Amino acid sequence: MGRAVRRRVWNVVLGIAAVFVFGLAAVRLFVLQTIELRDHGMEPRLGKGDAVLLDRTANEYSVGDIVVFYRGEFPFIRRVVGVEGDTVGVENGFVTVNGFPAETETRDALAYKDPEMASADGRDERTCTRTLESHSLTFYEVCISEGPDKRDTDVEARYIGPGHYYLLCDNRFHCTADSRELGPVAKGAIRGRVTHRMERAGAVDPAWTTSLFGLWEEL
């Protein structure tokens, strides 16, 4: 193979590599993004430290969708429980929509550790009741406290204006920030819809390929 031919082949390879790299960068910037959960707000479906995949092309959201919005540089991952035109409140930790309480079904207890919120006696374990909540033809699990650490902050019903969404933590008693505190969130503040969670394979499959790439579980 002559020098000129090798140069042409090398240029083609470099061109393909450049297209691949720029393509990945474009996808990362405009289409998909991975984000790590930094709090317990979405227990039991998502846990602190989980990596999720964000679809940044989404611009309309429905009840039940998990979305990401930012306050400063901190990403909050929360669930849509109300859309424009709805009147949403929280009673005993559960959602009310347009005057109707959500249907609920108690499942079991969920315990998790949170060293950052250790109580006065040094206890760093939190326990909540895993409960199925359903309204607007949507079903999802929430975490409700029944003990002395109860923080299911109830709020009066509030009308959601045009272009806004009511976002709540699934973990209603251990929540850094949601619409109970912030009010309805403008659509422009939402970065996209969470579509998948990455399962690191250690607990699922010890194969090195899984450990390296992870498994994406659709939400």
Image (cartoon, grey):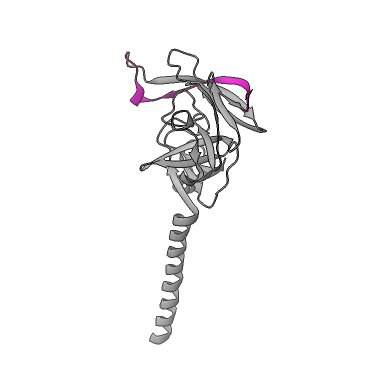
Q: Which quarter of the rendered picture does the C terminus lie within? A: top right
- The answer to if 105 sits in the magenta stretch is yes
Q: Nearer the viewer, residue 164 or 35?
A: 164
Q: Position of residue 74 (x, y in %)?
A: 38, 40
Depth order, front residue of 8/143: 143
Classify 1 as above or below 89: below
Instruction: Please give the name of the residue rendered at 47% of the width and 38% of the height, measured from the top-left corner.
Output: 77
- For residue 199, say whether it is visible: no
The residue lying at 40 percent from left, 36 percent from top is 38
Work out whether 205 lies above or below 103.
below
Residue 91 is left or right of residue 139, and the answer is left
Q: Position of residue 91 (x, y in %)?
A: 55, 20
State the image quarter where residue 63 is shown: top right
Q: Position of residue 80 (x, y in %)?
A: 55, 36
On the question of residue 148 being in view, the answer is: yes
Place residue 106 in its image quadrant.
Answer: top right
In magenta, the rendered stretch is 98-120
Q: Relative to 47, is 12 above or below?
A: below
Q: Is residue 64 magenta?
A: no
Q: Is residue 44 above or below residue 199?
A: above
Q: Residue at x 46, y 71 (%)?
A: 16
